[in-house]
Amino acid sequence: MEFGPHLVLALLEGSITAAVLALTAAGLALVFGILRVVNVAHGEFFMLGAVLAWFISTTLAEAFGAGPAIGFVAALLLAPPATALVAIAADRLVLRRIGYDPERTIVATIGLLYVLQQATLMSFGPEARPVEPPFNTRIALPWPERVDGSWALGWPWGFGTTSYKLFVIVAAVAVLVGLWLLLRHTRLGLIMRATEQDRDMARAFGIPVTRVYALVFGLGAALAALGAVLVVPIQQAHYLMGGDPLLLSFIVVIIGGLGSVGGTVVAAVLIGLTDGVVSVFFSATLAKIIATLLVAMVLVFRPQGLFGKASAR
Amino acid sequence: MATVTPVLQTRGLSKSFGGVDAVRDVDLTVSEHEVRALIGPNGAGKSTFTGLVVGRFAPSAGSIRFDGRDITALPAHERIRLGIAYTFQITSVFAELSVRENVALAVRRALATLNLGRRGRHREVRRRVDGALAQVGLDERAEAIASDMAYGHQRLLEIAMGLAQAPRLFIMDEPTQGLALDEIERFVDLVKRLSASTTILLIEHNMPVVMRCADRISVLESGRLLAEGTPGQIRADEAVQAAYLGRDVGSVAS
Amino acid sequence: MKAWLLHLGVLALLVLAWFVLPPYHTGNLARILVLAVYAQGFNLVFGYAGLLSLGHALFFAAGLYGLGLSIQQFGLPALPAIGVALFFSAAVAAVTGYLALRTRGVAFMIVTLMFAQTGYLVVLYAGTWTRGDEGFVIARAARTLFGLDLADERIRYFAALTLFAIVFLSLAALVSSGFGRSLVAIRENEERARLLGYDVQRIKWRAIIVSGVVSGAAGAAYALLFGYAGATFASVQYSILPLLWVLLGGPGTTIGPLIGTVFMFYLVDFASEITDAYLLLVGLALIALTLFLPRGIAGELRRRGLTWLP
């Protein structure tokens, strides 16, 4: 394949990364914005979503002979709420008891990371397991080629995508739009934003802050899990798959401006596309090195990220 | 006659936070051994002004001179090292450490420039700590943990920490707030004794204290210097009365 | 006075342990002592200065690979290789510390984590020399110091103990010095410390450099005494472990790091016989510690009566 189609292909793959990343990172941004804590176990909620998706679709297939489409829909509907419940349990048992103290929360969520990861290792096992996509027709993509001195559309071999991959992008966009609508145009969203602005004021207005916190923490986990359910037919479920999404979500949230969900989405697109392109043309490790250093430097030199507001001195 | 360099001199000192002008174009001069009180209604910019002097924030405009030296660009810790001590409006001490260690930390920093050798330093630290604690009447509580003490005593501790630095300029932000009456009496005596060895700039709301301690008073209102003078002059100043009490100037009874 | 007795007593116990304990445990103890040095390095920054670094593995690895590669690639003998390792750790700590200190709170934690991750990825990327995750073995012949064969169990034990003793006593002296107390002041109330004239940024930076050198010394010792260097030691896990050890033992105490390292080592040792997922125990331990025992073992002892505990 020539450079042109190769680049477009990289961009397409990058878009999928970006879509899933946007969902996952939005969850992290929401939690940081409203609870003001960093959840280091966020990647494990992602992993849980994928593992639960495998579990649900496999059980339905084996017990009821359900096809991949039904299995997938069930996973999509059940895995995120189940993950949310795990998150809410963690919030009630641990985070609330330590008063959402930033330092102790980081330590506690590191512990949670290991607990979730290793519990999955013990039950799910160390292998990667695939999940079948509900539909997966190949779609060949056209590319302008010179034929006999004039331009025509050709279909280069290997240059294409699948219907499922396009669906992932569409689904992610739909969910993000839904999230935006929730935050901006519903009462619940208003309550969440009020709590984010000023916790004590919100409490004074009768908003049950601890319940909002639990809800937001659950919602953040559900978003990550949803992203994972969407990507697992492409990627396979594995107990260590939470590491990369965690790192990338961090990068996105920081560059987008801690707490700004809108900035997060833009940053996710940027990072996802870049990651896709760099990984295709250069080594994946080098891409990660650059990304990691970039996060550090942004925090050091421009702590408000690209879209956050600079705090007063 | 030779002009003596004032200990503190600000020129056109201003600070804006976003759209709010907290301090506007303040020219203030404090001479050595003076006790200067800074008064004004709430929100007048007094704490912001002292915050600018000591270096907690950078000014939007203007300059600050300490003993003739321009310190406007110096970071806070270096200004302290030049000889400024500062107590916060809301008491700020090392809550989990003992009273003695609190003052010792202040002393050690101040002594760091002297070359005393280890044993000499231990002795000097102890001497200064005991001295500072005695001056504020906390010598009996030297081993207590700071946060275990009453708020008023913590305030006195903070003053002791400032004294322990043997400063050229001692800035105090509402030092008598939270003190009991007998403590306030002792504080007034302390200030009067101290002015012989240092220069004092204090923000105060307690008018009797101000009238008794201050050599001169500067009045701030809405960030601007409204009036300046001796206690007698300020007491009679109609603009000051209007600012504080919001009355029409014409209806003031003399 | 009591503090000195305690410190010397601990060291005496450790000497005694060699003669009293069976070889399996003394072998473990040699490892524990080196890791406890690492924990003490971390404790200086976390327990005393109050800075939560999530990237200390960078310094440990700097020492580990600084020594390992010096021997492996450049054929340096042990002593100059140690010098290289210490210098390299100091340099890395100075540079990353300076940058990281421009941030505070959560951002500081993330920046340190990112720097350490970069280090780990660089180790992987430079696989031709470092052999990545697989790592490389350092030949026994190269592991001699002052004519002593460090692979010999007795020599290895006492070499680890010597390093531990030096760091243990030096840090104990450091934290009771003016510098050490200024760290505590900064941890307790940074703004007050600043407005007493303390150059807070400079002091924190110095603490990070000392911490980096100590952690690097532990890394170099580990490579030298146990003859192996691998990328795992640069991974996030090795940034989390000293946090765990110090939290358990008691941040801001001198014996805390040792207590925490001993305890966790044996807990993990015990757990890994039962299951592959021994990290689960690490996770539960972290959660339990931050919930119920935020001051750690020595810290709680100090609060409940042993107020003289250094």
Image (tube, coloured by chain):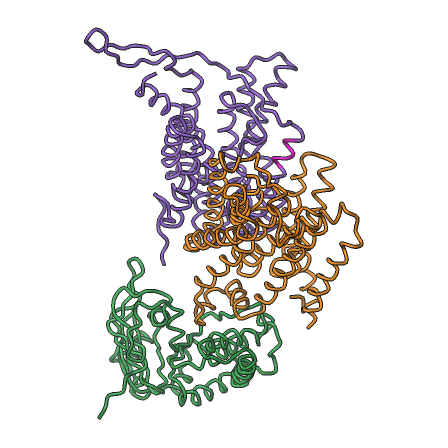
Chain colours: A purple, B green, C orange
Q: Residue at x 74, y 62 (%)?
A: C12
Residue A199 visible, this angle: yes
Q: Compare residues C42 and C31 and report the one nearer the observer.
A: C31
In which quadrant will I find the C terminus of chain B?
Answer: bottom left
Would you identify the image quadrant in which residue B237 lies? bottom left
Q: Nearer the viewer, residue A80 or B3?
A: B3
Residue A104 at what x, y percent from top left?
57, 51
B13 shown above or below A58: below
Residue C129 place in picture, x, y as percent: 50, 37
| Magenta stretch bounds | A116-121
Residue A189 percent across, percent down from the top left: 44, 39
Decide: is C194 above or below C295: below
Quarter of the rendering containing residue A123: top right
**Pick the front one: B19 or C52:** C52
- Closer-to-camera residue (C183/C177): C177
Main SS of the magenta part reads helix
Q: Is residue C73 magenta?
A: no
Which residue appears at 48% of the width and 61% of the height? C206
Is residue B107 placed above or below B189 in the rendered structure? above
